[in-house]
């Protein structure tokens, strides 16, 4: 499921204190576990770069930290308006502190966030079947609609190959073909 930019903004508003997380997930393409494990020192706000080196997974009620899904670190560049929303979460924290934290500090638990914040917010905006993974899909959709190449989307999402990205999001490029034909017609016709 893909949200429009307006739906993403509405969802973020409904998530209150967790709006920066929703903005981040919906525009960066990171997995929720990658966002949970994100540390302040891996955010270069002035260059809008996020270094993805770690992911968190809940196993038996405990958070387990390891490498991202593809076992490859990557750097993602996010829009300035996403960084602007994250800056208050970075202020005054040490480089090893988590960016997105639980209400009383410490690492955020993705399942608690989904159950206590996200599910209620999606119900309020009228899209009850939405899950945090859909924000990753939203980021891909928004990037493609903005003209991103398949390689750029692959790198953003951390897919092992462009084939994986095409298998998942290839249908979104169909509209781009029509837009391309229109642009060529305007420019050269």
Image (cartoon, grey):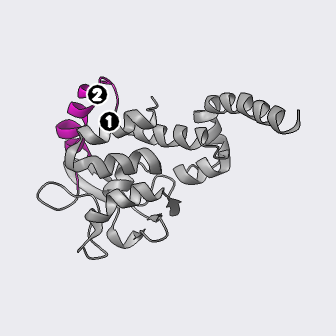
Rendered position, 30 above or below 135: below
Q: How crowded is mark 1: few (under 14 residues within 10 Å), some or many (20 or more)?
A: some
Q: Is residue 12 shown left or right of residue 30?
A: left
Rendered position, 84 above or below 149: below
Q: Of marks 2 and 1, which one's residue comes earlier in the chain?
A: 1
Answer whether residue 119 is magenta in the image. yes
Looking at the image, can residue 37 be seen?
no
Tell me the residue at 37%/60% (across/down): 84
* Viewer-side residue, 188 vs 165: 188
The residue furthest right is 189
**Location of mark 2 (residue):** 125
**Numbered disc total:** 2
Name the main secondary structure of what is drawn in magenta.
helix
Looking at the image, can residue 39 be seen?
yes
The residue furthest left is 104
* Viewer-side residue, 156 vs 11: 11
Tell me the residue at 66%/45% (across/down): 150
Give the magenta-colored segment's residue range.
108-130
Q: Do labels 2 and 1 touch, CB within 8 Å?
A: yes
**Location of mark 1 (residue):** 10
Question: x%, y% of residue 124?
Answer: 23, 27
Question: x%, y% of residue 2?
Answer: 46, 31
Looking at the rendered structure, the secondary structure element under dot 1 is helix
Tell me the residue at 45%/42% (across/down): 136
Q: Quadrant of the C terminus?
A: top right
């Amino acid at each position: 499921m893909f949200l429009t930019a307006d739906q993403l903004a509405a969802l973020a508003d409904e998530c209150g204190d967790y709006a920066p997380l929703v903005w981040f997930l919906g525009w960066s393409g990171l997995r929720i576990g990658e966002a949970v494990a994100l540390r302040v020192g891996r955010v270069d706000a002035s260059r809008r770069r996020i270094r993805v080196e770690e992911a968190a997974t809940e196993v038996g009620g405990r958070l387990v930290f390891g490498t991202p899904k593809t076992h490859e670190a990557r750097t993602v560049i996010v829009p300035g308006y996403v960084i602007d929303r994250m800056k208050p979460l970075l202020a005054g924290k040490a480089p090893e502190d988590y960016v997105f934290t639980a209400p009383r500090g410490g690492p955020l638990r993705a399942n608690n966030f989904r159950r206590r914040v996200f599910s209620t917010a999606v119900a309020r905006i009228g899209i009850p079947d939405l899950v945090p993974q859909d924000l990753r899909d939203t980021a891909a959709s928004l990037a493609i609609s903005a003209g991103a190449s398949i390689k750029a989307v692959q790198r953003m999402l951390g897919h092992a190959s462009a084939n994986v990205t095409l298998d998942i999001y290839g249908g979104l490029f169909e509209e781009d073909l029509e837009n391309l034909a229109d642009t060529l017609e305007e420019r050269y016709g």
